Amino acid sequence: MTFGRDEHVWIPESDLEGMSVDTLAVRAGQIRTGQLEHSDAIFPTSSFVYGSAAQAAARFGGEEPGNIYSRFTNPTVQAFEARIAAMEGGERGVATASGMAAILSTCMSLLKSGDHVICSRGVFGTTNVLFQKYMARFGVETSFVSLANTDEWKAEIRPATRMLFLETPSNPLCEVADLAALSAIARENDALLVVDNCFCTPVLQRPLEQGADIVIHSATKYLDGQGRCVGGVVVGPARYLDEIYGFIRSAGPTMSPFNAWVFQKGLETLPIRMRAHCDNALELALWLEQQDCVEKVYYAGLQSHPQHELAKKQQDGFGGVLSFLVRGGREQAWKFIDATRMISITANLGDVKTTITHPATTTHGRLSPEDKARAGITENLIRLSVGIESIKDLKTDLDRGFQALKD
Ligand SMILES: *Cc1c(COP(=O)(O)O)cnc(C)c1O
């Protein structure tokens, strides 16, 4: 595919038709300059020059495609957008400064005052704040429902409902939404199904293939995978993405070329990383289930998980995040966390390094006691974002926690 730019050449996407996500992760959305570099070039420039005044006029007038200014046209950012869009099976991708900027830009572009949103209760805490505090100020009302209960979604539909928003699997309890059922509800009611696909990535789940209208990512998590940059991206059909692009151009929550380059390189190893995360997480989930000090393990890969069959059908793996309850309360949970030595105590997730979190006092600390209870965020809950270290060493480190509980 040629984009009509004379500065560089896009490697033809038609050669990649029908290829798998593993190949697209490495090959899609590549540009090559006259230097014939093999790795992706990076274009850290705010603006671009023109061959003549007439050409500048044609670019600004939209008569000639090409780079203008990096708030809305940067080749490195476009390369990342093209790669993730190919992996998700979407027509177009638009990158943003953060995952939150991706969600905000989607709402600002596709909703208006008077519209109604239905959102799953377990979404990322800041997403909750965005809907409840900020979107509400602009006349967009949001109802919150249980992710896995399709009837609740149906019951909340109103004539003004314009968007269904969810994350699946949920954080931290790994509940799974039925994407096909929710997509049917959205379609019947002329609403958009928007899926934050941060936990699965396109390697494990491609929501657009299952009827979602728009996919959102916090690239900060698995897409980077190594904790270096903050960024986000929206993928979907051009009729929606052109609107979102227009908002980014006007409002400016743009991804920097440097970050885009880091994410572009991150995508190349995403398929092998995701499989390593999944393998480690499943083995740890099975191991944790056998521990005396563990009351319950939440992971969709376990037979005991209520939506295990649905997850198996809808995902190509169960992901790297799991949660479990230790016997006791906050004191025992903190004691367990503090006894680990290698695993990082942090609220971040999606990193190659395993992280351990106490949701009730960190990621979900701002929820009222009632909301915490309703969301199942108890004081004895611990979340692991399982990395790619050796499974043996992970068990050794977690075993320090179990020893501490026995003392
Ligand atoms: C982290 C996260 C976000 C927000 O992304 P940022 O890049 O931190 O702005 C949104 N959704 C989910 C599921 C997340 O984990």
Image (cartoon, rainbow, N blue to C red):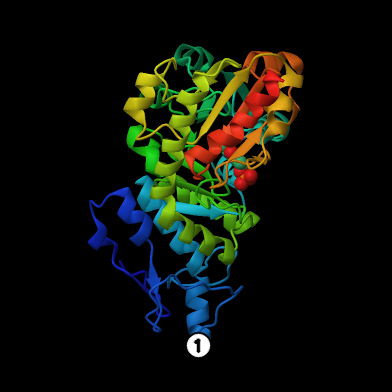
Q: Is residue 168 visible?
A: no
Q: Mark 1: which secondary structure? A: loop
Where's the C terminus, which quadrant? Answer: top right
Residue at 61% over, 39% down: 355
Residue named by callout 1: 52
Crowding at mark 1 (Cα within 10 Å: few <14, some 14-19, many 20+): few
Which quadrant would residue 311 be assigned to in this image? top left
Which quadrant would residue 38 be assigned to in this image? bottom left
Where's the N terminus, which quadrant? Answer: bottom left
Tell me the amino acid under the disc marked 1.
Answer: Ser
Q: Is residue 185 visible?
A: yes
45 to 328, vertically: above or below: below
The percent coordinates of residue 57 (x first, y second) are 52, 78
Picture quarter with ligand 1 = top right
Residue at 63% over, 40% down: 343
Residue at 43% over, 50% down: 270
The percent coordinates of residue 107 (x first, y second) are 58, 39
115 to 110, vertically: above or below: above
In this view, the residue farthest toward the bottom is 52
